[in-house]
């Protein structure tokens, strides 16, 4: 069988990895684009052995970058979540981790001008998925994105150069409001009733309390992943909320689009042990959370989810806000989120009227892994 070639690069950003394309190198036909994305990752096999994925949601990703036509914007960026064992290309959400790599790609590919002796540059990015502008502070050396550094991201074993991502007015990208259903929504399933929060900040998320699911929220992922009844109930909550929020017309359609909204389980600060055996003390976090992506527990916590949970933590009355310890009159703070592989710190600011979020910010590392030609079967 013959194959054709498409230029691309593979980048890691935070705890995610994806294939990056310059839009100019892709065909205009959308169906052919999707074939390239699915073949490149190998959406067709659960193991993704025939492509560059690795059978996990945080490595089944594609980003398409182009020079922007918007005023004062450097590049446009579209994110695609690719299926695992199913033919799926989903652009309804975005990826907060790979945003750092978008900045690195823009610098490495010469899509922005870098001063000869600069050690950093702010890259202005328009994310088409959420229709929001990002500012990505990219460390540079010799005109390229810097890789080496001493900043450590939980979920990685080696430090790197620090990238800082800031998103202004992150709420309402998909539904028009950060809390389209109010602070808390009462949801009924066949099993029981739940108080949940639906928050639309960067990526839409459903937040449910661990205790309402009959768990502590700090159990190992492998233990929870073997509980089919729990997974089924979580998916029921997620898909029902997709319909209630207007993101899906029916439960069946919601189940066909498992990438958004995502769902996270939250609980109060408590001692727990990470998947690597590190003890996290209750005093080191403002809350503890686990998230699911594409029906599976996330190894760490998606960057887009970190933005969303931090935003929800600052909005009065939400499920997440119930667990924050500092006084509610603080308009800007760092939210410390305990997740399965450590603690993530997210900077978040609320407008003075306390009704919405002014910005969210996250620090990540990124690097180019490989650049070359991707071969796609005819």
Image (spheres, helix red, strand yellow):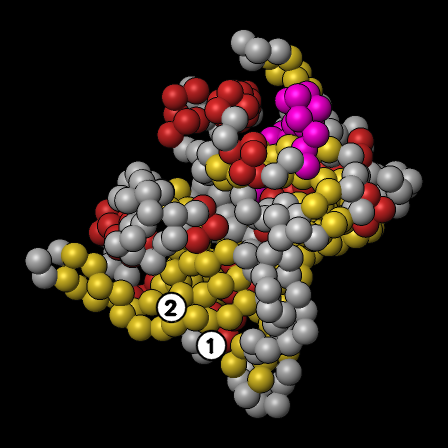
User: Residue 13 versus residue 114: which sits nearer the camera?
Assistant: 13
Is there any visible trace of residue 215 in the rendered image? yes
On the image, the x and y values in percent for residue 114 come to 55, 82
Vertical placement of 190 versus 134: above or below? above
Vertical placement of 164 versus 254: above or below? below
Vertical placement of 291 versus 244: above or below? below
Which quarter of the image is occupied by the N terminus? bottom left
Vertical placement of 372 versus 343: above or below? below
User: Residue 118 versus residue 234: which sits nearer the camera?
Assistant: 234
On the image, the x and y values in percent for residue 96 come to 56, 53
Q: Are marks 1 and 2 in contact (CB under 8 Å)?
A: yes
C-alpha span from label 1 to label 2: 10 Å
Q: Which residues are magenta?
A: 197-218
Name the side, left or right, on which 345 lies relative to 275: right
Residue sitting at 46 percent across and 58 percent down?
17
Residue sitting at 45 percent across and 37 percent down?
294
The 10 Å Cα crowd at callout 2, few under 14, some 14 to 19, many 20 or more, is some
In the picture, residue 15 is in which quadrant?
bottom right
The residue wearing badge 1 is 108
Residue sitting at 43 percent across and 53 percent down?
59
Disc 2 is placed on an element classified as strand
The nearer-to-camera label among 1 and 2 is: 2
In the picture, residue 263 is in which quadrant?
top right
The residue wearing badge 2 is 9
Residue sitting at 56 percent across and 76 percent down?
147
Disc 1 is placed on an element classified as helix
């Amino acid at each position: 069988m013959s194959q054709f070639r498409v230029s691309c690069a593979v980048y890691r950003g935070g705890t995610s990895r994806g294939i990056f394309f310059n839009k100019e190198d892709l065909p205009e036909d959308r169906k052919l684009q999707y074939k390239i994305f699915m073949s490149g990752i190998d959406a067709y096999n659960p193991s993704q052995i025939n492509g560059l994925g690795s059978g996990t949601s945080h490595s089944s990703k594609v980003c398409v970058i182009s020079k922007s036509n918007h005023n004062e914007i450097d590049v446009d960026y579209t994110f695609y979540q690719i299926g695992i064992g199913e033919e799926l290309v989903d652009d309804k959400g975005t990826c907060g981790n790979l945003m750092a790599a978008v900045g690195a790609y823009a610098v490495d590919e010469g899509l922005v001008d870098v001063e000869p002796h600069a050690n950093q540059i702010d890259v202005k990015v328009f994310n088409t998925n959420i229709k929001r502008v990002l500012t990505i502070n990219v460390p540079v050396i010799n005109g390229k994105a810097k890789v080496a550094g001493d900043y450590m991201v939980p979920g990685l074993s080696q430090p790197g150069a620090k990238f800082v991502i800031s998103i202004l007015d992150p709420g309402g990208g998909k539904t028009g409001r950060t809390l389209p259903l109010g602070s808390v929504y009462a949801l009924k399933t066949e099993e029981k009733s739940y108080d949940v929060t639906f928050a639309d900040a960067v990526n839409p998320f459903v937040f449910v309390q661990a205790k309402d699911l009959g768990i502590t929220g700090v159990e190992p992922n492998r233990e929870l992943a073997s509980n089919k009844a729990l997974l089924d109930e979580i998916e029921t909550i997620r898909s029902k909320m997709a319909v209630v929020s207007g993101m899906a017309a029916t439960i069946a359609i919601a189940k066909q689009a498992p990438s958004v909204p995502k769902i996270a389980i939250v609980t109060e600060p408590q001692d727990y042990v990470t998947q690597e055996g590190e003890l996290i003390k209750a005093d080191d976090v403002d809350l503890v959370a686990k998230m699911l992506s594409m029906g599976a527990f996330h190894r760490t916590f998606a960057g887009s989810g970190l933005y969303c949970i931090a935003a929800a933590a600052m909005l009065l009355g939400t499920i997440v806000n119930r667990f924050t310890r500092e006084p509610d009159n603080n308009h800007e703070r760092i939210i410390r989120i305990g997740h399965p592989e450590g603690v993530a710190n997210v900077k978040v600011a609320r407008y003075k009227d306390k009704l919405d979020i002014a910005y969210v910010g996250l620090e990540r590392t990124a690097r180019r892994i490989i650049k070359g030609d991707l071969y796609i079967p005819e």
